[in-house]
């Protein structure tokens, strides 16, 4: 069921470019399905004995009281739904995802337009520590140097030799940069 319609100029899943979008309501379902015959007298949306018309649509919004009655009779699934399953990444994927996540957080919640790459790498180490993954600064700088091109983040050169970090492109060419962009 549609919860609402809204306008948003951003793309959806980096593919859909329509500015008009819909927000869907959440759907709860039971596995295995519960027979309505056993519950029909206790559910208000089934209207007592004449419940065939109430079950003709695929989805129906029901009251909280009816949901609790159904919920009390349900056999719960033994497998978690996909959004509760464990997700595993190799360490390279985890670091790349952490770089992109940290960049997105800083871009959204901080007003700065640039930051020293070395400061960003230190923050990356703290960010990863919060997930229980510990890497030294040197390991993260080496990884960032070799894989910065994979993130798509823009970098700027610096004249200050203390700021310089050598970044490699996809063909192995190297160039010195000092700043990371948040624009």
Image: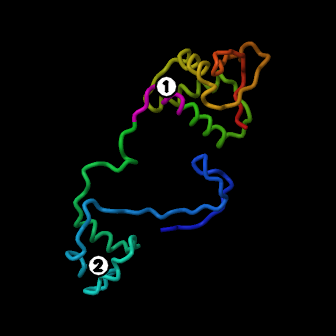
Q: Quadrant of the C terminus?
A: top right
**Residue at x 24% of width, y 50% of height:** 78
Q: Position of residue 139 (x, y in %)?
A: 53, 16
In the picture as drawn, the residue positioned furthest to the top comes out as 161
Residue 95 magenta-drawn? yes
Count numbered badges in the picture: 2
96 with respect to 9 (left or right)? left
Tell me the SS state at disc 2.
loop
Q: Position of residue 44 (x, y in %)?
A: 32, 81
Tell me the SS state at disc 1.
helix
**Residue at x 72% of width, y 20% of height:** 177
Q: Is residue 61 above or below residue 154?
A: below
Give the image quarter of residue 86.
top left
Q: Is residue 62 above or below residue 10?
A: below
Q: Give the residue at mark 2.
A: 43
In the picture as drawn, the residue positioned furthest to the left comes out as 38
Which label belongs to residue 84?
none
Foreground residue, 150 or 128? 150
Q: Give the residue at mark 1.
A: 92
Residue 48 magenta-drawn? no
Q: CA distance from mark 1 to mark 2?
A: 52 Å
Q: Position of residue 95 (x, y in %)?
A: 51, 28
Range covered by the magenta-colored residues: 88-97
Are discs 1 and 2 less than 8 Å apart at CB?
no
Give the image quarter of residue 5.
bottom right
Foreground residue, 65 or 146? 146
Badge 2 density bin: few <14, some 14–19, many ≥20, Cα 10 Å: some
**Residue at x 53% of width, y 32% of height:** 98
Main SS category, magenta section: helix
Q: Position of residue 138 (x, y in %)?
A: 56, 15
């Amino acid at each position: 069921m549609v919860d609402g319609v809204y306008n948003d100029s951003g793309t959806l899943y980096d593919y859909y470019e329509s500015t008009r979008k819909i927000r869907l309501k959440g759907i709860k379902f039971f596995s295995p399905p519960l027979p309505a015959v056993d519950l029909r007298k206790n559910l208000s949306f089934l209207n007592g004995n004449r419940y065939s018309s109430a079950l003709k649509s695929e989805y129906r919004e029901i009251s909280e009281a009816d949901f609790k009655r159904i919920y009390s009779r349900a056999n719960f699934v033994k497998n978690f739904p996909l959004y509760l399953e464990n997700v595993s990444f190799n360490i390279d994927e985890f670091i790349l995802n952490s770089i992109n996540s940290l960049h997105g957080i800083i871009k959204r919640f901080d007003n700065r337009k640039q930051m020293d790459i070395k400061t960003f790498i230190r923050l990356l180490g703290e960010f990863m520590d919060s997930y229980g993954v510990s890497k030294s600064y040197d390991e993260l700088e080496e990884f960032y140097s070799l894989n910065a091109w994979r993130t798509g983040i823009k970098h700027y050169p610096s004249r200050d030799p203390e700021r310089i970090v050598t970044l490699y492109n996809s063909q192995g060419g190297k160039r010195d940069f000092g700043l990371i962009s948040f624009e």
